[in-house]
Amino acid sequence: MTAYLNALGVICALGSGKAEVAGRLFAGDTSGMQVHPQPVAGRRLPVGAARCALPALPCDDPRHATRNNQLLLAAALEIESDIRTAISRYGQNRIGVVLGTSTTGIQEAAQGIAGLLHDGAFPPGYHYAHQELAAPASFLGEWLQLAGPCYSISTACTSSARALLSAKRLLDAGLCDAVLCGGVDSLSDLTLQGFSALEATSETLCNPFSHNRNGINIGEAAVLFLMTRDTDGEADIALLGGAASSDAHHISAPDPDGLGALSAMRQALARANCTPEQIAYLNLHGTATPHNDAMESVAVAALFPHGVPCSSSKPLTGHTLGAAGALEAAFCWLSLSPLNPDQQLPPHRWDGEPDPALPALNLVAAGIRMNPTRPRRMMSNSFAFGGNNISLILGDAR
């Protein structure tokens, strides 16, 4: 059964809303990456923060009072009319919510615990529910008064890619007629300190697939798709297929041979009923860490021996963790949408110095356009700790 992605709301370091994000995406604009105002373990780290004003939350419930939910609300408000139309058409009990996240409101929770340790009492406004993994889905479902399946997924950096797969399964199983799906993660001291402790962060703009790559930048984002069985949305784009795998090689390092990644990509192609030659563009996971980029290069070169136009968007947004899979699927959606009339591909921003130890990839230069052959197909990869791999394929629905 085809799962149509009929509407998209998005906010990240590239801006707020599809039009602003698309303009800066295809320009390869890295200006949203700014140094975090506070040092992290004594280092000044670039981060991809959403810098626009965020909407006020629609209720005074202290359970929902987090920046994470404000980001999610910004994405939801962009497509509110589409959501309300779907509610009217299908009914509240036939619409589900599936969101990926890894941070939820952990920043507010950490501030609350710091207040408890310093003052002996939690500060006003603190609520334990801020840090619950289900918090984003619960907030969205309650705000919209939905009664369908409503849950969050947290599988680290594949969370929101997995949410799209789960949403499609709800449609396929006949449990929902529409699903709000995507992901949200906000910047937090916990993740910045944690990745710094792993020696995985870079003090400069991340540099995917370069010989000089030395780590990630962290970002934040919220992405919300309206997925249905119908095509009456903004663009005739569908989630054609997707697959997950787990190589369980190491708690944090990927299988250096890329076997799990390759398995996910091959299964995704099979489920989308297409061949590697039909993929017009691949959004790489491309974190700019030594191990990830080496593994992904090997896997991509094995699947696409004749090459495929590809790029990592991490230098434009930072690694948005639990939101990354949906955000990069959104970049494929924007590439296929009427917001990209020139058929540009997202450029790969790096220093242009390839790693001679890695297979060469066809990294997209600025101004490159996709092959006009239809139907158009795009792949997006997401990889996570524990050998957790997801590959999605989006494309023209007809």
Image (cartoon, grey):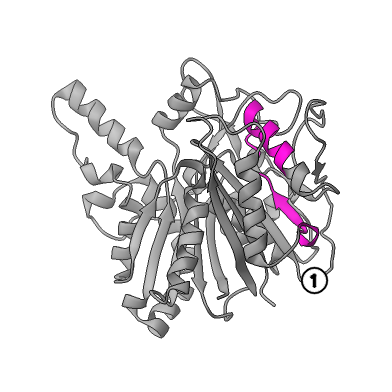
Question: Residue 348: x percent and y percent?
Answer: 75, 42
- Residue sitting at the far bottom: 89
Q: Is 207 on the left or on the right of 72, as rendered?
A: right
At label 1, the amino acid type is Arg
Residue 225 placement (x, y as % from top left):
51, 64
Secondary structure category for the residue under label 1: loop
Residue at 75% over, 67% down: 376
Residue under label 1: 374
Q: How many circles with numbers are drawn on the protein?
A: 1
- Residue 152 image offset from top left, x and y in percent: 37, 54
Task: Name the residue nearer the viewer: 130 or 213.
Answer: 213
The residue carrying pointer 1 sits among few (fewer than 14), some (14 to 19) or many (20 or more) residues within 10 Å by Cα, namely few
- Position of residue 57 measured from the top left corner of the image (x, y, whole percent): 33, 56
Does residue 264 sit above or below 174 in this rendering? above
Taking the spot 80% from the left edge, 71% from the top edge, the residue there is 374
Magenta span includes 126: no
Q: Residue at x 22, y 40 (%)?
A: 126
For residue 339, above or below residue 283: below
Q: Quadrant of residue 353?
A: top right
Tell me the residue at 68%/38% (across/down): 296
Q: Which residues are magenta?
A: 276-299
